[in-house]
Amino acid sequence: MDKFEAIRAMSHFTKVKLSDFYMTKKEWEMRNSNNRKIFKLADTTTSTSGIATSTPSTKGVQGILWFKEIIQYAEDLRRFDQAVMHNEYMVNTGAHEVMIPRTTSHLSINTSTSEGASRTFTELNNISTVAVTLSASDFKKGGIAISKEAAKTSMVDLVAQARYAITQAMARDLDVAIATELQDSSVTNRVYGGDATNPSELTAGDILTTDLVADAMYELEKNNFVPKLLFISPAQLKAFRKDSQFVNAAEYGSNDVVLKGEIGQYLGVKIIVTTNVPAYSAGATDTNESSHTWGAAGHCCIMVGTNHLEQLVAGVVAWKEKPTVDYEYNKLQAEHRIYYDQAFKVKILEPKAVCLIKVTDS
């Protein structure tokens, strides 16, 4: 006689507790042990309806779990912001243009004065300005819209992913703009791989060497600029890794500040690797020398220098609107909106503070 049968046998005068009407877990398991069935999902492609099909053998029964973290695309490394100065004078103002003063030459002071005569004053006439003027295209505006349905039925945070994608786009747009401007046609300091004298003459084997780095340094130094940074692509890094003259970043042995993307230095020039170094396919028109096309696939590596005051005089990013990522939920359209906004202009300042090293990849 089990518990329920005992209870039914009690007289109606017997006082019972509510718990008398429930089985314990152990009692339940004992009662059903003889009736328990073990179901095993098919591990072959059977045709049992409702449990297995010819593709996944357990379609409709097997569950699918989503990894809750998105594996991100290997984005390029943005490094060129370290090569130029950043000016924020126009931010939060109504201005659309900023004037940047610069000296254009050494000023010789007239010191020839006869005894008893008044000194001769020299006119301060070696100052000019570079105008950085915004246009409508310098205002970068974009966004990502995610429907309510997509957001509600996704196992991953689509809004967070949209924010990530927009910040990556912002950083890349700035980096590419700087790299492009540093190839301006006003830059005439150039060295080439092998015995080439222009991009059209580049052939296989005209790769980057430490000798070319020394040649580029000379181009800056003869104009009184101090070579500081060299931007190369992974293809050129491969060549450097095989060069015993190259000093690895791990061998600095000093308190030098290691910059973003910096992997070493040669003759005091810090080497920075990024895939945003301008790449050219065979036959592509050179940005800096538009009358020439490339004879073989390669990269235009960029060396920049400072003046003796350590100013990054090669170029400037004139900001109008600093990068902003905004969010709103639009009820009318039932969608999440993530906005991309930034406004800037990149301008070359001292073309002689830049040297372009044009080489092939192999």
Image: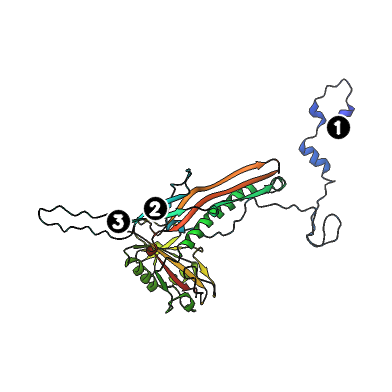
Give the mark, 3 or 2, whose residue is nearer the N terminus.
2
Q: Nearer the viewer, mark 2 or mark 1?
A: 2
Amino acid residing under circle 2: Ile
In the rendered image, residue 346, in percent from the top left (x then y), is placed at 47, 56
Q: Are marks 3 and 2 in contact (CB under 8 Å)?
A: no
Which residue in the protein does label 2 denote? 100
Q: Is residue 164 left or right of residue 18?
A: left
Which residue in the protein does label 3 denote? 125
- Asked whether the viewer can see residue 42, the reply is yes
Vertical side of 293 occupied by 305: above or below: above
- Asked whether the viewer can see residue 77, the reply is no
The span from disc 3 to disc 2 (Cα, nearest Å) is: 16 Å
Asked whether 348 or 251 is in front, the reply is 348
Give the mark, 1 or 3, whose residue is nearer the N terminus.
1
Few, some or many C-alpha atoms within 10 Å of disc 3 (few <14, some 14-19, many ≥20)? few
Quarter where residue 209 is shown: bottom left
Give the mark, 2 or 1, whose residue is nearer the N terminus.
1
